[in-house]
Amino acid sequence: MGLLLKQSTSVDVLIGPFMDEDDGKTTEEALTIEDEHVLLSKLGQALAAKNDANDATHDDLGYYNCPLNATDTNTLGTLQLCCHMAGALPVYHEYMVVTANVWDTLCGADLFQTDLTQMGGVAQSATDLKDFADAGYDPATDKVTGVKLCDRTTLVDGVTLCDQTTLVDNVTLCDETTLVDTTTTNTDMVADVASDVTDIKAKTDLIGASVALETGGKIAGIETTLASPDNFKANVTNLDAAVSTRAPSGEYDTEVAHLDADISSRAPTSEYDTEMAHLDADITSRAPAGEYDTELDTTISSRAPASEYDTEMARITANVATETKQDTNATHLTDIKGGTFNGATDSLEAIRNRGDSAWISATTVDLNADQSAVTIGTVNTALALTANNDKTGYALAAAGIDGIWDEVIEGTLTGRQVLRLNLSALTGKSSGGGTATLIFRDNGDTKARITATVDEDGNRTAMTLDET
């Protein structure tokens, strides 16, 4: 059970502690907790904002004083309070709303209302109870008289179970009260039983004389039944009649004769033997297995030996390989020469045999000659490598720098645009803290560079960027 609250009474409750949602231990002491942020559930019903319009104010260590009014506490029973602020862990509290009498008794000078109102169906005063306690119980004055619980109670007609039996002085428990007294229901029941007995007797007349136990448990009349077995003879006669109505044995003989005739009308065994002989003759008239073997061997032996097939296949494979190589070589030479390849002038041998003079001209360098005296050209001393190894004074042109910053690094964002967004998020002015929309301005405070939509936990759910 939660903390007690007095019904329909304004009260300040201390809610918290509100802790940082990231580390779970740093107190949040600057939250703006408005009335719509504090939700109440009465008797487990749907949460709704508290009715009191005052904001909660920070007290200490992350605890806040939260005002509730008489409407917030007007329902007896459980009252649950929930509050979840952006950047802080959620806070929950449970209360029990009690009546004014219970609250004032537990927390004030009142007493529990314990009036006795249901003894004898009427209110009893403390004086009545005191008089009874002081004087004690006196049968002569305190007894209950004239109350009859039973009055001549009869279960079956004429049989009285209780008649003016008194347990306590002048208190009659049973006196001439009849529960069942010669009712039509009993009469009908007796008649039904008698009818059933008559039916049973009629169905057992064939047994013979009535069976009854004599003194000592002997069954009377059994000797008479055995001495006069007319009833048993009647049953035997019925059995004979049932047997005599069956078909005579002559009819069974006739059916057997028909069965013999059906069997004898079938073909004799000799005809089956003849058919089997024909089948044997057909089989023996076929060529013997040896002839099939001879013909097959002759056909196979007349073919060329396997070695000849191998020789021919080797020749075919060699010819195919040669043709393929020739085609490949011709293609390569054509690619080198261009157009058609002339073996007399374009082969490597022909090129080699042209002589050194054909390789040297006035505009070419003779690789066979001494090149030590060759002058390549005038070298600018300002660009001498020995004087510029540290690259001092070198710088990228503006176009080169722009090319680097305008390179796309993610999605459609360039390095220049990413830098603008970072500058806004880290150093720009911001607004909307604690609400569902956070805004970050550009460095010159001329536009909203980043607009973020966040949920109640501060998590970003949508982003609008202006990187221009």
Image: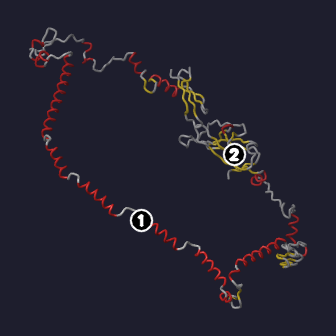
Q: Are there few (<14), some (14-19), or many (20+) residues within 10 Å of tag 2? A: few
Q: Residue at x 46, y 24 (%)?
A: 412
The residue closer to the viewer here, 120 or 269, is 269
**Is 450 rendered above or below residue 112?**
above
Q: Secondary structure at mark 1?
A: helix
**Residue 353 at x, y = what percent?**
8, 16
The dot on residue 263 is 1
Q: Residue at x 59, y 73 (%)?
A: 245
Disc 1/disc 2 C-alpha distance (Å): 95 Å
The residue closer to the viewer here, 388 or 41, is 41
The residue closer to the viewer here, 191 or 406, is 191
Give the residue number, with chain letter if any, for mark 2: 45
**Is 432 rendered above or below residue 224?**
above
In contact (CB < 8 Å): disc 1 and disc 2: no
**Residue 323 at x, y = what percent?**
17, 27
Residue 307: which quarter of the image?
top left
Residue 106: which quarter of the image?
bottom right
**Residue 329 at x, y = what percent?**
18, 24
Q: Secondary structure at mark 2?
A: loop
